[in-house]
Amino acid sequence: GNPSIALFFHPIRYQAAQMISRRLAAIATVVCASSVSAFAPTQQHGSVRIANTELNIFGGLKGAFANDDDLGKPQNAGLTGGPKVNENVSINGKPVNAVVGQKISQVAASARVKIPYSCKNGDCGTCVVKINGRNQKACQATVPNGKCQISVN
């Protein structure tokens, strides 16, 4: 007959195939039995039923993503000590809130003081204001440390 059918039904190969299928069935039984508790919807504790919502498939990995206490106290991800505020800034005599290094154009806009601009690059000179008595371009100048009096014409 057909040689492939003869090879399939060969007694030794047939026994080996049965042995392999029995081992696979045994492995599957162990895996299923060990993970049955992972999918148990409830647990009985006395007369109270407690719902189990966790999957305990990986068991020992519960603490793998926990916080590490050896790292110390978590630090604020922002600026250390916060921004350096200059409380001595005024525009046309009106006190305003400003941060050291902030552009004068931004400080003036937040105080609703209009400054004319053309290029906003510092090329044209349209935005010249007086900062502590000196002419400077508002689009380029920044808030210094200490007293800062800004005069807009």
Image (cartoon, rainbow, N blue to C red):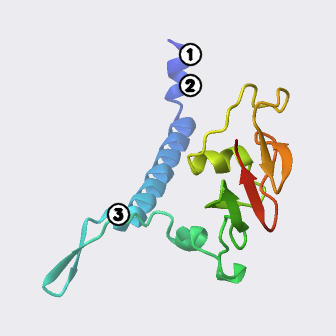
For label 3, the residue is 36
Q: Residues within 10 Å of mark 3 (few under 14, many from 20)?
A: few
Is tag 3's residue or tag 1's residue first in the polypeptide sequence?
Answer: 1
Amino acid, disc 1:
Pro
Q: Position of residue 39 (x, y in %)?
A: 33, 62
For label 1, the residue is 3
Callout 1 touching callout 2 (CB < 8 Å): yes
Q: Position of residue 55 (x, y in %)?
A: 40, 63
The image quarter containing residue 74 is: bottom right
**Where 103 falls versus 3 (above or below)?**
below
Return the residue found at the far top: 1
Which tag is nearer the camera, tag 2 or tag 3?
Answer: 3
Which corner quadrant holds the C terminus?
top right
* SS for callout 2: helix
Distance in Å between CA atoms under marks 3 and 1: 45 Å
Residue 26 is left or right of residue 4, and the answer is: left
Which numbered tag is attached to residue 7? Answer: 2
Residue 124 is left or right of residue 92, and the answer is: right
Q: Residues within 10 Å of mark 1 (few under 14, many from 20)?
A: few
Distance in Å between CA atoms under marks 1 and 2: 6 Å
Q: Residues within 10 Å of mark 2 (few under 14, many from 20)?
A: few
Amino acid, disc 3:
Val
